[in-house]
Each structure stands twice: as C-alpha cells, then as structure tokens.
Image (spheres, rainbow, N blue to C red):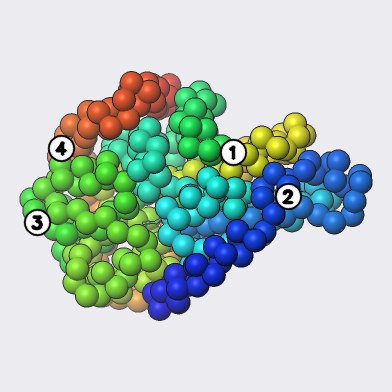
C-alpha cells in the first residue's frame, strides 16, 4: 500500500499538469439547472479525498455523489479522487484554493497550518463523550458562520464538518499516563497546534504526511501515531504496533471544503442542493463511522498481536489536566477570532449536553 502511495506521489506532477490543462472552475461550474436546460452534457465536480478507497471519507463522497447526481438529473457528475491519486493533504488544499478542484476534504490537523482557527477541532478534551452531542456541535450553524471568514480568506468555502471517530494512540507501549509519553516519538498531522498538544504530555511529536506513517513505523523513525481505528486498520499501521490506547481525548474531525470561486459561481438552487445533501449526511455518516470503527477494531483484534487498552476516568483526567494549557497556545496562534471560536465551541458543547 505504501508502495502504491509512493508511486502515486511520483505521478503527482503529471496529474497537476492535467489539472492545469482542464478548464478553470468558473467555466465548468455554470449552474446545473441552466445547463440542463440549454445543453445535454453534464458539468463535472472533482472531489478529492485525504483517505483511500473504502475509508470514511470515501463512503461520504460516494453517497454525496449518488445524491447530487440523482437530484441534478444527470446535469452534474461528481468524480471522486481517493488519497494517492493527487498528493498530500496540503497539496490537495492548494489545488482547491487554485480552483483545480471543486471539492475536497481538508482536515484541521493539516489545514490549521493555513487557517489557525480550525485548530480548535484538534484540541484535546473539548468535545463531549456523547457522539450525538458532538454531532450537534459540529454541525451548528453558529460555529460554521464563525469559521467561514477565515476559510474565505484562504479562497475556500466551508461546506461541512464531519466527525470520523475517536482518535486512538497506537504504539510500541500502552500509553496510560503522561509518564508513558516521555520521549515517545509520536507522528502527528502537520499543523503546529498538534505538536503542542503532544509536547504537553512530554512526548516527542514528529509531524509527517499520512502516506509516510507506515514506513515511519516500519523503520523505527516513530514509536507510534494517532488516528481513528478505521484508519489504523486500512493503512495497516496496527501491523507495526503492539498496543492501541483509547483515551477518548478527541474525535478525528474533517471539513468538507469547496473552491470559493467555484462555489460563488453556482446559482442559488445548486448551492441549496449541496447544503441539503450536507445536512442529510450528518446523521448518516455518523452512523457509518461508528460501524466502520467498531468492525475494524474486531478485524485488528482478530488478527492478533495488538492489545486494546481503555483508559478509565481517573487516567483520562490526568491527560485532561495536562491538555488545558494548549487552549491558550491555540488562542495565541489563532488570535481573537480563535478565542471567539473556542468560547463558542465550548458553550455549544454545554448547550447541547443539557
Ligand atoms: O493522519 C492523517 O494524516 C489522516 N488521517 C485520517 C483518518 N484522515 C486523513 C488524514 O490526513
């Protein structure tokens, strides 16, 4: 698998060239309804994923495609590009910003590099333990409205926020306390706020792209990494790890983003259709991700060689206390707008919990 990702990375310049030769987003994205009336051929929306085929993002994208294509009566075709066909998460985001793609997943763990405010989704122990509460918080229009301006500053349109499951630490040891993290080389996604989160536990955080994690584990460049279970299974990370530790410290959250120039070129009814499908998929994808994560944990444990460790409330509380200072670091990085995002986020968790 890592081999094929490496090959795909080699193909990347070629694909970039193809993208550069294709018509700009504005030309392709005339309104679905007016096109359907005036000419039979459909417009194409290119939708890039940060995950491979069969992943949670792929499942979302396939369902999004199915609903958009059927609702637009064939006027719109959605082409899905799984991870490995275009480039790293940051490269995909750049393609989206330039209008070479119409849609993509952009995970805060990488995107906070460009949009520090979105780093709020990577903070530890800010969400509820209840998935239903988290679903309501993450889809709350107030939160989306606060995040939209920084997305637009980066030529992006925030279309949705999706939870993909609880993050789990995989490692060569069980990670029951910050003492276990002492000197532990943990791979993180590439945004600086994640590095701070693991420094707070005493770890030695090592940011790297997703495609390099398997070989990093194999070669001993890192001792462990953190991701939801479905990803640990489909990327084969568990094969190189002895322990999975679940502290339910954070959900893996991604955002569905559009190229801003493309989104602005759409007519009202097409935009409304996207928002309608996005709203319908909130509960749908949450059920799917829960099923994926449960089934793939069974697959990992059935394969043998990996132990499952669940932290109790006292153990979680030690990590919670250690994580609190990182909220201030987030505010330093994301500024006043970041403070407002964090305060709103925490207030929404309380509101939906009641
Ligand atoms: O760890 C990462 O980099 C990636 N993890 C997941 C589950 N999705 C995409 C992201 O890039």
Dot 4 falls on a residue whose secondary structure is helix
> Is residue 342 in view?
no
Question: Of the residues under marks 2 and 3, which one precedes in the sequence?
Answer: 2
- Callout in the foreground (1, 3): 1
Residue occupying image coordinates x 48% and y 50%: 94
Question: Of the residues under marks 2 and 1, which one precedes in the sequence?
Answer: 2
Q: Residues within 10 Å of mark 1 (few under 14, many from 20)?
A: many
Q: Position of residue 182 (x, y in %)?
A: 8, 53
Classify the position of ligand 1 by quadrant: top left, top right, bottom left or bottom right.
Answer: bottom left
Q: Is residue 313 above or below residue 75?
A: above
Q: Is residue 17 left or right of residue 111?
A: right
Question: Of the residues under marks 4 and 2, which one precedes in the sequence?
Answer: 2
Question: Of the residues under marks 1 and 3, which one precedes in the sequence?
Answer: 3
Question: Of the residues under marks 4 and 1, which one precedes in the sequence?
Answer: 1
Q: Position of residue 312 (x, y in %)?
A: 21, 46
Dot 3 falls on a residue whose secondary structure is loop
Residue occupying image coordinates x 52% and y 57%: 49
Q: Are marks 3 and 4 in contact (CB under 8 Å)?
A: no
- Callout in the foreground (4, 1): 1
Q: Is mark 4 within 8 Å of ligand 1?
A: no
Q: Is residue 201 left or right of residue 62?
A: left
> Which residue is the site of mark 2?
28
- Quarter assignment of residue 305: bottom left
Q: Position of residue 186 (x, y in %)?
A: 21, 57
> Is residue 164 in view?
yes
The disc at residue 183 is 3
* Figure quadrant of the C terminus: top left
- Quarter assignment of residue 235: bottom left
> Which residue is the site of mark 4?
322
Considering depth in this image, is 61 or 315 the residue closer to the camera? 61
């Amino acid at each position: 698998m890592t081999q094929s990702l490496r090959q795909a990375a080699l193909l990347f310049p070629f694909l970039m060239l193809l993208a550069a030769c294709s018509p700009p987003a504005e030309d392709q994205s005339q309104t679905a309804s007016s096109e359907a009336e005036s000419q039979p051929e459909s417009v194409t929306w290119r939708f890039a994923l940060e995950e491979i085929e069969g992943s949670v993002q792929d499942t979302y994208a396939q369902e999004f495609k199915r609903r958009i294509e059927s609702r637009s009566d064939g006027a719109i075709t959605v082409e899905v590009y799984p991870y490995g066909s275009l480039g790293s998460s940051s490269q995909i985001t750049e393609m989206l910003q330039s209008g070479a793609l119409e849609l993509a997943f952009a995970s805060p763990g990488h995107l906070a590099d460009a949009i520090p405010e979105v780093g709020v989704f990577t903070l530890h122990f800010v969400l509820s333990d209840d998935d239903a509460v988290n679903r309501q918080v993450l889809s709350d229009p107030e939160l989306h409205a606060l995040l939209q301006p920084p997305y637009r500053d980066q030529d992006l349109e925030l279309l949705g926020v999706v939870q993909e499951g609880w993050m789990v630490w995989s490692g060569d040891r069980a990670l029951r306390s910050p003492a276990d993290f002492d000197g532990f080389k943990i791979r993180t996604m590439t945004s600086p706020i994640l590095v701070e989160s693991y420094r707070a536990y005493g770890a030695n955080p090592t940011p790297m792209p997703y495609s390099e994690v398997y070989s990093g584990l194999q070669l001993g460049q890192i001792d462990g990494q953190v991701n939801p279970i479905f990803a640990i299974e489909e990327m084969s990370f568990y094969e190189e790890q002895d322990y999975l530790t679940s502290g339910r410290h954070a959900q893996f959250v991604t955002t569905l983003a559009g190229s801003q120039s493309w989104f602005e070129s759409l007519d009202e009814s097409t935009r409304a259709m996207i928002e309608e499908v996005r709203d319908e998929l909130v509960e749908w994808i949450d059920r799917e991700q829960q099923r994926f994560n449960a089934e793939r944990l069974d697959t990992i444990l059935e394969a043998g060689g990996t132990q499952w460790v669940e932290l109790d409330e006292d153990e979680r509380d030690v990590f919670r206390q250690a994580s609190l200072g990182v909220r201030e670091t987030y505010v330093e990085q994301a500024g006043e707008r970041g403070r407002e995002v964090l305060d709103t986020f925490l207030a929404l968790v309380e509101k939906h919990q009641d």
